[in-house]
Structures are given as structure tokens and as C-alpha cells.
Image (spheres, grey):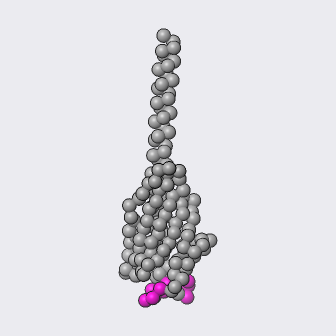
Amino acid sequence: MKKVVWLILVLIVGVLIGYSISNSKYKIQTHSRENLINEIIIFGGEAKAWYRTPAIEGGGGNADVLPIDAVTLITAFIDPKAEFGVIETEYGFYTLTLEGWVLSIDGRAKSKNVIQSSGVINLNDGEEAGVTILPVQEIHK
């Protein structure tokens, strides 16, 4: 009888441990996804702020034509330590590319299950800093 009770207790503890591990993985993935999206939105707003900032202060000056090195300038405006078009934070890696007036920010979370997302912003679309977030992708290793 004692063996049966011990076996049942071991099974219950095992199930609880398995559930809590599974639940924490889900929370980590959700947290990574939310951080990735939030940083893309922040970077998009800062890129828009760069465009509106006078050129004499290091911004785009609401110019009719963007400079050839606009990605480098935007990257430095967002994070002075960052290299050409690539920003690293504690949550992920972000690559900035510019095609015409549209800035794309591609993010990749620092987690075991790679979570990727992208955002696009039109730098000269008026006063709103609207960043369009593209669907989040999860790549399981």
C-alpha cells in the first residue's frame, strides 16, 4: 500500500513539474515576442523623429530627398553605439533597411525558439509615426 501511495505522489509531482516547465516556456516566448514588437515600435518612432529633426541637429530635416547614408544616420540617431543598420539590445537584434521613404526594421529575439518580426514606417507620411507590424514568426529549433 505504501508503494502505491509513493508512486501516486511521484506521478503527481512529475505532472506538476512538467506543467510548470511548459507554462514558463510559454511565458518566456510571450515575453520575447512582446519585447521584440515594442522595440520595433520604439525604433520606428525614433526613426520618424530623426526625419523631423533639423539637419543641423543631426536629423533628416524633413528633406525632400534622403541622404545616401540615411540608414547609417538613422541607426546612429537611435543608438550611437550601433553599427551600420544593425542595433543590438538585451532582447534582440534589429536590422534597418531603407527603400525609398519606407524604413523596414527586422527584429530577431534572443531566445531558444527564434522569434522574428518586422515593422515598416513611411518616413514622410505626415505627422503620425505609425509603425506597421508584420506578423510574428516563430522558428522552433
Vertical order, 47 against 135 (above or below): below
For this view, does 10 lie left or right of residue 123?
right
Q: At 52% across and 66% down in the image, what residue appears? A: 94
Q: Position of residue 129 (x, y in %)?
A: 41, 74
For this view, does 129 lie left or right of residue 70?
left
Residue 113 lies within the magenta run: no
Asked which quadrant contains residue 83, the reply is bottom right
Q: Position of residue 92 (x, y in %)?
A: 53, 60
Q: At 42% across and 77% down in the image, what residue appears? A: 102
Vertical order, 129 against 1 (above or below): below
Q: At 54% across and 73% down in the image, what residue appears? A: 85
Q: Residue furthest top?
A: 1
Q: Position of residue 135 (x, y in %)?
A: 38, 61
In this rendered view, identify the residue nearer to me: 113 or 45: 113
Answer whether residue 59 is visible to the viewer in this image.
no
Q: Position of residue 120 (x, y in %)?
A: 41, 71
Q: At 44% across and 62% down in the image, what residue appears? A: 117
Which stretch did the figure color magenta? 56-66
Answer whether residue 55 is visible to the viewer in this image.
yes
Badge count: 0
Main SS, magenta region, reads loop
Vertical order, 124 against 82 (above or below): below
Q: Residue furthest right?
A: 81
